[in-house]
Image (cartoon, rainbow, N blue to C red):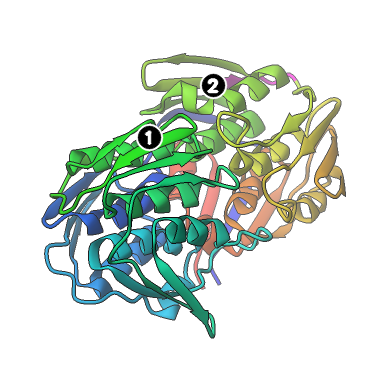
């Protein structure tokens, strides 16, 4: 089993170009199914979930090619409308392919998706939206069999501003006749990025970034050429790494507005942060960090649930107490027990975690159980005294490209041990 070996106490200095956003490239790859032609995507991260998505596209009949950070997808001739169970199980977001397959082929068969275990993340909202468009969906033996060759545009009110359901509905609506209005839509920057790619393919979509998105249906679309936005959660994680270890780092290719809630918390804790066009800089001096006001996760533009664990790892070593309230997922404190192994003082009651800052953390043997929780363990280890060993890094590598090499280039003492 691969693992990270981290010796803390080394400040970080340098420049980091932030790679493309995992939560943008995955729905964009699904959207390539709508184009009868070649799509070219730039700034694509090299991640396990991306590899899984490319395998799904290949299975469906797409011709896929990757050269460094450029992915080319030729979806001109699809040959299948099903996704095998083993591919669906590799990542939760695999369900995003459902809307694109139905829109393009009029039918789809998939099993329930996999991914990190963060509590209930039902696909019911996805299915309800597709049914509103006229898709017929039957559920038998863990399989979803869908037909949607006569979908009609309509007004859809999402029960929750689900990112995945918003994206799936956008893709399916491109294949429906007439206009679809998605109300209570998610407002995340990745939704705006998906809209940008769909427009590059010739789709008529507007409103992304607001709570109401309008899609004028009409296929076929053509291939698109698009530059994927940088990953705001990866950027937030690197900010946390510097806040934990100390030093000064410049993040390139980042829109400050997308990480402003995280930056504000770290600034309140005592970090120095400045921003300019597509650049964010953080400096953490030797003085101890302070606890902050309550941190409540919320849909964008609120504090992102994906940044909760890394920020908690930072504030575990601080002066004062910080209260976290997790409003998105019910099981997103699995990293807490691991942080306690490093000496953190954290108490969890339901959705609330109370972090009583301690003067120092110490190295420990740690186990990553999910993507962002695993990143939090790396953040904690960078600022801890002594050596930490982090196993289960396959979870981390689902969302971070070459995390160990990037941190090492900044001065961290971190190595990847294989086997």
Q: Secondary structure at mark 1?
A: helix
Q: Residue at x 54, y 21 (%)?
A: 282
The segment highlighted magenta reads 282-287
Q: Is residue 25 above or below residue 4?
A: above
Judge whether residue 7 is colored magenta.
Answer: no
- The residue lying toward the viewer, choosing from 114 and 110, is 110
Could you tell me residue 323's position as x and y percent? 82, 33
Q: Residue at x 41, y 48 (%)?
A: 167
Could you tell me residue 9's position as x and y percent? 66, 37
Q: Quadrant of the N terminus?
A: bottom right
Mark 1 highlights which residue? 192
Could you tell me residue 226's position as x and y percent? 22, 40
Q: Residue at x 67, y 45 (%)?
A: 328
Q: Is residue 229 visible?
A: no
- The residue lying toward the viewer, choosing from 386 and 344, is 344
Q: Nearer the viewer, mark 2 or mark 1?
A: 1
Say which mark, if any, is on residue 282.
Answer: 2
First along the sequence among labels 2 and 1: 1
Q: Is residue 273 above or below residue 26?
A: above
Disc 1 crowd rating (10 Å Cα; few below 14, some 14-19, many 20+) is: some
Q: Residue at x 44, y 79 (%)?
A: 85
Q: Quadrant of residue 56?
A: bottom left
Q: Secondary structure at mark 2?
A: strand
- The residue lying toward the viewer, choosing from 120 and 133, is 133
Q: Horizontal placement of 6 versus 137: left or right?
A: right
Q: CA distance from mark 2 to mark 1?
A: 26 Å
């Amino acid at each position: 089993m691969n693992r990270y070996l981290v010796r803390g106490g080394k400040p970080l200095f340098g420049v980091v170009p932030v790679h493309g956003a995992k939560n943008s490239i995955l729905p964009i790859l699904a959207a390539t199914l709508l184009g009868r032609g070649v799509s070219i995507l730039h700034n694509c991260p090299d991640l396990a979930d991306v590899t899984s998505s490319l395998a799904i596209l290949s299975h469906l009949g797409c011709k896929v090619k990757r050269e460094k950070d450029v992915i080319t997808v030729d979806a001109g001739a699809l040959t299948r409308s099903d996704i095998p169970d083993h591919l669906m199980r590799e990542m939760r977001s695999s369900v995003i392919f459902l809307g694109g397959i139905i829109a393009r082929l009029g039918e789809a068969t998939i099993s329930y998706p996999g991914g990190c275990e963060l509590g209930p993340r039902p696909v019911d909202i996805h299915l309800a939206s597709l049914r509103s468009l006229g898709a017929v969906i039957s559920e038998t033996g863990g399989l979803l069999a869908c037909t949607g060759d006569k979908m009609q545009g309509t007004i859809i009110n999402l029960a929750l501003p689900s990112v995945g359901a918003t994206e799936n509905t956008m893709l399916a609506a491109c294949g429906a006749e007439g206009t679809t209005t998605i109300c209570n839509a998610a407002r995340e920057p990745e939704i705006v990025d998906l809209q940008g790619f769909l427009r590059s393919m010739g789709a008529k979509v507007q409103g992304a970034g607001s709570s109401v998105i309008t899609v004028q249906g009409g296929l076929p679309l053509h291939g698109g050429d698009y530059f994927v936005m940088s990953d705001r959660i990866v950027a937030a994680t690197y900010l946390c790494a510097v806040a934990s270890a100390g030093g000064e780092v410049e993040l390139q290719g980042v829109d400050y507005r997308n990480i402003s809630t995280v930056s504000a918390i770290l600034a309140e804790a005592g970090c120095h942060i400045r921003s300019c066009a597509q650049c964010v800089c953080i400096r953490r001096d030797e003085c101890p960090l302070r606890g902050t006001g309550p941190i409540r996760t919320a849909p964008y533009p609120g504090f992102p649930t994906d940044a909760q664990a890394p920020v908690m790892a930072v504030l575990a070593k601080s002066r004062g107490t910080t209260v976290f309230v997790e409003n998105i997922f019910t099981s997103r404190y699995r990293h807490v027990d691991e942080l306690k192994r490093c000496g953190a003082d954290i108490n969890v009651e339901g959705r609330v975690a109370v972090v009583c800052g301690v003067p120092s953390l110490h190295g420990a043997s740690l186990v990553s159980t999910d993507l962002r929780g695993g990143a939090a363990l790396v953040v904690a280890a960078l600022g801890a005294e002594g050596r930490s060993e982090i196993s289960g890094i396959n979870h981390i590598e689902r969302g971070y490209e070459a995390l160990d090499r990037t941190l090492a280039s900044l001065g961290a003492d971190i190595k990847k041990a294989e086997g």
